[in-house]
């Protein structure tokens, strides 16, 4: 781990676009040592006026460029170019060849997520996915939104909107038989959020946050009955 005397880490940011440049600024302000690699000459010269020696010119898909930027001592490599193939390759090389423990990749096209998953490049960030999650939270509907997925840690946080006919409506929290490995951590009701207590009674329209083991997501959503009518006993013939 390349920790600096001031307490920050050495971080390598590949891609000097708006995302990479702004990210570098923030990381530097937080006390980290940062180097940006940019392959476009004009962009490099523009960034150099501000970051000076902290930006290197070159194609980060070439090993000598990465080595010149000090990848061997980097605590983290963040690949945020506009090309998903480059981001994937750079993170793979950082992990497999130089032993960088922490990498973060930008995914420009959400359809490429499966390639990052398949090759074990995590975490990755998709602006499209993040905006879609915000839209899903703002649009009233019965369902769930994935807020956080920590696959390596075996934990995820989901946002659930409880339907009017869900079987858990009208029941106290301590009466619920939540699937093992799940926990309700927050309730949003009429625009106000609070941490539930054992005597909290769930109401229709409650928006709840749950932390859980991803393997039981289907079991939990089935139990909570997120869609209207879901989870209710079938009518007798």
Image (tube, helix red, strand yellow):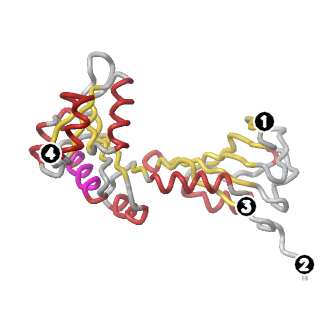
- State the residue position of label 1: 197
> Which quadrant holds the C terminus?
bottom right
Picture disc at residue 142: 3
State left or right for residue 87 relative to residue 159: left
Mark 1 crowd level (few <14, some 14–19, many ≥20, 10 Å Cα): few
Earlier-in-chain disc, 4 versus 1: 4
Q: Secondary structure at mark 4?
A: loop
Report the Cα–Cα distance between label 2 and label 1.
35 Å
Q: Residue at x 84, y 59 (%)?
A: 164
The residue located at (28%, 42%) in the rendering is 16
- State which quarter of the image contains the N terminus: top left
| Label pair 2/1, CB-CB below 8 angstroms | no
**Front position in the image: 3 or 173:** 3
Q: Which residues are magenta?
A: 86-95
From this viewpoint, which residue is outermost toward the right? 237
Given contact means CB atoms under 8 Å apart, are the residues at marks 3 and 2 in contact?
no
Q: Nearer the viewer, mark 3 or mark 2?
A: 3
In the rendered image of this protein, does residue 9 appear above or below residue 119? above
**Callout in the foreground (4, 2):** 4
Residue matched to label 4: 58
Real-space Cα distance between discs 3 and 2?
26 Å
């Amino acid at each position: 781990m390349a920790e600096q005397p001031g307490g920050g880490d050495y971080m390598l940011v590949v891609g000097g676009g708006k995302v990479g440049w702004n990210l570098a600024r923030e990381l530097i302000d937080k006390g980290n040592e940062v180097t940006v690699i940019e392959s476009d000459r004009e962009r490099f010269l523009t960034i150099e006026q501000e970051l000076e020696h902290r930006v290197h010119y070159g194609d980060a898909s070439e090993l000598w460029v990465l080595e010149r930027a000090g990848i061997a001592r980097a605590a983290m490599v963040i690949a945020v170019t506009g090309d998903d193939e480059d981001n994937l390759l750079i993170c793979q090389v950082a992990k497999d060849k130089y032993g960088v423990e922490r990498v973060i990749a930008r995914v420009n096209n959400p359809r490429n997520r499966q390639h990052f998953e398949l090759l074990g490049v995590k975490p990755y960030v998709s602006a499209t996915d993040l905006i879609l999650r915000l839209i899903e939270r703002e649009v009233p509907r019965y369902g769930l939104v994935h807020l956080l997925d920590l696959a390596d840690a075996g934990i995820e946080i989901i946002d659930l909107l409880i339907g009017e006919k869900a079987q858990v409506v009208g029941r106290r929290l301590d009466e619920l038989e939540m699937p093992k490995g799940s926990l309700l951590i927050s309730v949003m009701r009429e625009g106000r959020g609070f941490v539930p207590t054992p005597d909290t009674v769930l109401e229709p329209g409650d928006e709840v946050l749950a932390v859980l083991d991803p393997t039981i997501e289907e079991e939990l959503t089935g139990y909570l009955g997120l869609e209207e009518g879901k989870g209710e006993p079938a009518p007798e013939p």
